[in-house]
Amino acid sequence: MTRKIIVTSDPGQDQAVAILMILGSPEAFDVLGMIATAGNIGLDLTEKNLRKILELAGRPDIPVYLGAPRPMGRPLVTAAHVHGPSGLDGPSLPEPIMRTQTKPGVDYMVETLRATASGTISIVSLSPLTNLALALKAAPDIAGRIREIVMMAGAYFEVGNITPSAEFNVYVDPEAADIVLRSAIPITMLPLDVTHRMLSTPARLDRLQALGNRCGVAAAEMLRFSETFDLKKYGWPGAPLHGPCVPAYMIRPELFQGRLINVTVETASELTLGMTVADWWRITERPRNVFYVRDGDADGYYDLLTERLARLP
């Protein structure tokens, strides 16, 4: 079954690979548009990186829209220390030719959801949730029109990767995450608890490199750049590969395990700002608002990723 999707992204090497996986799966995804988010790097670079990825994959027909340049109520926190000053260091990708759309991304999301049959569009969130939250705030009626939100966000058992208690996508804009989690839209969350099990070992990266196509080679080069920070930080045999967990779950949910629970986000504490509190053991009576994915089959994940990237130019 093909899902109509709108993607929000702030690439980022792992998100670039996630987008390539989406584009290599046309039977699974009909990509209506992509909205650039300020996050891993500033909006001026994330929108350019989106266009670079689409041109790399031979898909300049997919429109790119500009999202908000900053979180809803806080200064922007970026991760250039991980992703490099361009936000997408590693391969040498040409400057994009395709143009960014003039319509603001939030307006595009609202108008598209209102103009399309209710329950037919999924939101694929690879980034901070700013643009989705702004759309929900501006047009509350769209909540009932969204089929589902599948997001790379949050952590509980693995706790934090930007602070001791918070995952980056939520920490950048916790107020936005709070709005989305309270929206009553069906949500699936792929948190660090599962992404930290999906390690890009040298053998797995060699498989991508060995594909020989430009997308496979570029993906390997991207991940070899961004892994440097994580290998030093964690001391694991490979770096976690976050973003592609989202399309992988949507294509083959049987590769993953999770359960429906309540997830809330801390928006006030200086110590735990952006922490996602996952009621995994169902201790409270709070509404179960998130299908929370805790584990997955790493070999199956990388097999699927390699298969889909092999289809690309």
Image (spheres, rainbow, N blue to C red):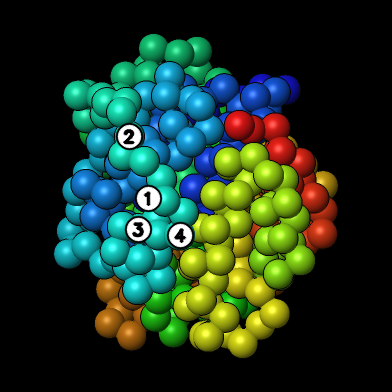
> Is residue 41 visible from the viewing direction of this image?
yes
Of the 4 image quadrants, the one containing the C terminus is top right
Q: Distance between the residues labelled 4 and 3?
A: 10 Å
Q: How far apart are marks 1 and 3 (CA)?
A: 8 Å
Q: Which amino acid does label 3 sit on?
A: Gly
Q: Nearer the viewer, mark 1 or mark 3?
A: 3
Question: Is residue 127 left or right of 71 when viewed as pictured?
Answer: right
Contact? badges 4 and 1 (CB < 8 Å): no
Contact? badges 2 and 1 (CB < 8 Å): no
Mark 4 nearby-residue class (10 Å; few <14, some 14–19, many ≥20)? some
Question: Is residue 79 left or right of 4 when viewed as pictured?
Answer: left
* Position of 29 relative to 169 (above/below): above
* Position of 135 relative to 232 (above/below): above
User: Label 2, on which residue?
Assistant: 96
How far across and down, in percent of the image, does residue 262 sit?
57, 60
Q: What residue type is labelled 4?
A: Gly
Q: Distance between the residues labelled 4 and 2?
A: 16 Å
- Label of residue 87 in the image: 3
Q: Distance between the residues labelled 4 and 1?
A: 16 Å
Q: Which residue is drawn at 64% across and 40% down?
A: 213
**Element type at marker 3?**
loop
Q: What residue type is labelled 1?
A: Asp
> Is residue 288 visible from the viewing direction of this image?
no
Q: Nearer the viewer, mark 2 or mark 1?
A: 2
Contact? badges 1 and 3 (CB < 8 Å): yes
Q: Counting residues from the N terminus, which is met first, the one under dot 4 or under dot 1?
A: 1
* Position of 244 relative to 65 (above/below): below
Q: Counting residues from the N terminus, which is met first, the one under dot 4 or under dot 2?
A: 4
Q: In which quarter of the image is residue 157?
A: bottom right
Q: Counting residues from the N terminus, which is met first, the one under dot 3 or under dot 2?
A: 3
User: Label 1, on which residue?
Assistant: 10
User: Label 4, on which residue?
Assistant: 90
